[in-house]
Image: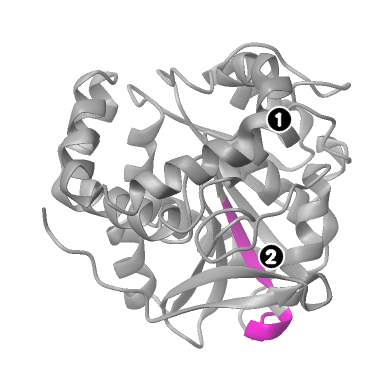
């Protein structure tokens, strides 16, 4: 297994009046345009492809991955609604000295990215979504995909999520010898596009690094995501005014491609960028395209002086 470079800066910031903390990892340029990178479900602050990290360093981008509550360096906490997330992000932005920024949401990070754009309409320059989760209830809902099972499991997760997260964390604390074979095994039973991505050493190393650093202390965030995605998000998708670019694999077996088409139809300023032949994990291979497009939109929205 190849190694992965450590983030340039890694730490945590106090939120909720100092009662909790949110972990972060920073890559690229400390003085560049800021991009907040929100991991998938499961995932943590280091779920940032190595090629995206290098692109950020080469193109003067300040790329920041965050732990959601209950994973990595973030204190366990259950949001009641997706819209509760920006209240935690605000103190992180203040502590890191960030005013304007782009936000990227991968899969389960998608709803939180849209909530951020809704909550900070003058500060979010643009949004990138990669195979994002769509609402399951309310007027913006669509059926199908992984959250069909997530919604059914929500009552059990509400009771057993925290103990399950603690058990998984205990396992991960001693799992390094078997983690890489486990990722390889998952790849063997995945669609061909995901299998090809996981065959690349740099992506397998990134997932392993993120899993071991993000999950060995606590692993409750994925179960919290299931609960909050099964409820109304607390805002309407159509009220997100920032430009949104939505990438989605047309062979996605977890979040159907129709979900991406549905979400883009609800957003007032959005473009769907189909990824032919790609599944769910494999779309992470488009991370450089995402950053390139967001920079281009940024230049349009905020022309250089």
Residue 124 in the figure: left or right of residue 162: right
**Could you tell me residue 82's position as x and y percent?**
77, 44
For the question of whether residue 45 can be seen, the reply is yes
The verdict on residue 73 being magenta is no
Residue in view at x 19 percent, y 27 percent = 185
**Could you tell me residue 250's position as x and y percent?**
44, 20
The local secondary structure at tag 2 comes to helix
Q: Which one is closest to the eye, mark 2 or mark 1?
A: 1
| Residue labelled with disc 1 | 159
Q: Earlier in the sequence, mark 2 or mark 1?
A: 1
**Vertical relation: 12 (above or below) 199:** below
Magenta region: 94-104
**Could you tell me residue 112's position as x and y percent?**
69, 48
Which numbered dot is residue 178? none
> How far is mark 2 from mark 1, CA to CA?
45 Å
Q: Residues within 10 Å of mark 1 (few under 14, many from 20)?
A: few
| Residue labelled with disc 2 | 301
Image quadrant assignment for residue 298: bottom right
Q: Quadrant of the C terminus?
A: bottom right
The local secondary structure at tag 1 comes to helix
**Vertical relation: 301 (above or below) 147:** below
Residue in view at x 50 percent, y 60 percent = 72
Residue in view at x 22 percent, y 65 percent = 4
Residue 297 in the figure: left or right of residue 278: right
For the question of whether residue 246 can be seen, the reply is no
Decide which of 38, 224 is in the foreground and name it: 224
The verdict on residue 95 being magenta is yes
Mark 2 touching mark 1, by CB under 8 A? no
Q: Residues within 10 Å of mark 2 (few under 14, many from 20)?
A: few
**Could you tell me residue 187's position as x and y percent?**
23, 28
**Vertical relation: 53 (above or below) 147:** below
């Amino acid at each position: 297994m190849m190694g992965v470079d450590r983030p340039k800066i890694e730490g945590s910031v106090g939120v909720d009046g100092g009662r909790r903390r949110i972990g972060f990892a920073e890559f690229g340029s400390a003085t560049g345009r800021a991009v907040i990178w929100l991991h998938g479900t499961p995932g943590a602050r280091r779920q940032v492809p190595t090629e995206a990290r290098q692109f950020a360093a080469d193109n003067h981008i300040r790329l920041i991955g965050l732990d959601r509550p209950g994973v990595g360096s973030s204190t366990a906490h259950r949001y009641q609604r997706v819209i509760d997330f920006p209240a935690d992000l605000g103190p992180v932005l203040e502590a890191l000295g960030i005013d304007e920024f782009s936000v990227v949401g991968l899969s389960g990070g998608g709803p939180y990215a849209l909530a951020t754009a809704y909550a900070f309409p003058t500060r979010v320059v643009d949004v990138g979504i990669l195979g994002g989760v769509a609402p399951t209830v309310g007027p913006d809902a669509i059926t199908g995909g992984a959250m069909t099972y997530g919604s059914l499991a929500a009552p059990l997760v509400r009771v057993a999520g925290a103990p399950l997260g603690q058990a998984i964390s205990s396992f991960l604390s001693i799992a390094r010898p078997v983690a890489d074979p486990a990722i390889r095994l998952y790849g063997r039973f995945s669609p061909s596009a995901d299998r090809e991505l996981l065959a690349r050493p740099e992506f397998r190393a990134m997932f392993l690094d993120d899993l071991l650093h993000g999950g060995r202390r606590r692993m409750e965030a994925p179960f919290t995501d299931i609960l909050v995605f099964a409820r109304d998000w607390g805002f309407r998708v159509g009220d997100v005014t920032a430009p949104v670019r939505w990438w989605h694999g047309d062979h996605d077996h977890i979040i159907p491609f129709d979900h991406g088409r549905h979400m883009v139809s609800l957003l007032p300023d959005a473009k769907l960028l189909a990824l032919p032949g790609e599944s769910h994990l494999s779309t992470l291979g488009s991370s450089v395209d995402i950053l390139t497009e967001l920079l281009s939109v940024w230049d349009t929205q905020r022309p250089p002086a």
